[in-house]
Image (cartoon, helix red, strand yellow):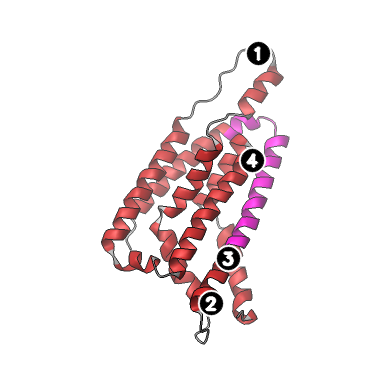
Amino acid sequence: MFDVINVIPFIFACLLLNILPGPDSLYIIARSATQGARAGVVALLGIMVGVSVHIVAAALGLSALLATSAWAFTVIKIAGCAYLLYLGFSMLMAKRPQQDGPEGEQHVKQKVELPRTASLQRIFAGGFLTNVLNPKVALFFLAFVPQFIPAEVADKTTMFLALGGIFTLTGTSWCLLLVIGTVWLRKHLSGVGRLSFWLNKAAGGLFVYFAVKLGLASA
């Protein structure tokens, strides 16, 4: 079923697309920096489950509905904008843990380094919903993956799902590197508590930006 001539370029394309910074990478880095490796991995799982939903939908032809129906595209777009705004403003409004005074500096550092701003369930939902409620992700897979399916392949749905699995695998590998790198920096950089706090704020601002950008998008 696999044609090496088509699969190898597809893998390289997937790696390049995953390395490019975007809302998914930003979300994983922000959660890893503020809440540690477990939160980063949970964010990664939520994102990849959301991506998998779009891959299956595109393979079954459901994403074509978004490409042809302005009404369906607009409904999902509005829902995605609303959730991105909610997520962004939640991160922007998160308060920094209070410091109790100059003494006990190490204790204060621990308090600042580990702000439990969201449950693991909420982190997973954040990664999942920011993908599922973004119609541009569905249209991306609908436009990108078929380019690597040879015309002579009989079972194009299975081929689509297989290539989608490769995309998910490369994305997971890259995002795990992001988690590991962010957590390493979190442990070894001084003042990382302050850095994590402001990174969370920056991520919130960018999610608001992504919401506006999605809101202005057309099918």
Classified by dominant secondary structure, the portion drawn in magenta counts as helix
Q: Which amino acid does label 1 sit on?
A: Pro
Residue 55 on the magenta span: no
Verify CB contact (< 8 Å) between mark 2 and mark 3.
no
Q: What stretch is highlighted in magenta?
A: 167-196
Where, by quadrant of the figure, is residue 167 drawn? bottom right
Q: Residue 102 carries which label?
A: 1
Q: Position of residue 86 (x, y in %)?
A: 40, 39
Q: On the image, numbered disc 2 is attached to which residue?
A: 148
Verify CB contact (< 8 Å) between mark 3 and mark 1.
no
Q: Measure the alpha-carbon separation of dots 4 and 3.
A: 23 Å
Q: Residue at x 37, y 53 (%)?
A: 214
Q: On the image, numbered disc 4 is attached to which residue?
A: 38
Q: On the image, numbered disc 3 is attached to which residue?
A: 165
Q: Measure the alpha-carbon separation of dots 4 and 2.
A: 35 Å
Secondary structure of the residue carrying tag 2 is helix
Nearer-N-terminus badge (4/3): 4
Q: Which amino acid does label 4 sit on?
A: Arg
Q: Quadrant where the N terminus lies?
A: bottom right
Verify CB contact (< 8 Å) between mark 4 and mark 1.
no
Nearer-N-terminus badge (2/3): 2
Q: How many marks?
A: 4
Q: Nearer the viewer, residue 121 or 198?
A: 121
| Front disc: 4 or 2 | 4
| Front disc: 1 or 2 | 2
Compared across the picture, whether 128 is left or right of 213 comes to right
Residue located farthest toward the left when viewing the structure as drawn: 71
Q: Which residue is drawn at 60% across and 66% down?
A: 166
Q: Are there few (<14), some (14-19), or many (20+) residues within 10 Å of tag 4? A: some
Q: Which amino acid does label 2 sit on?
A: Phe
Nearer-N-terminus badge (1/2): 1
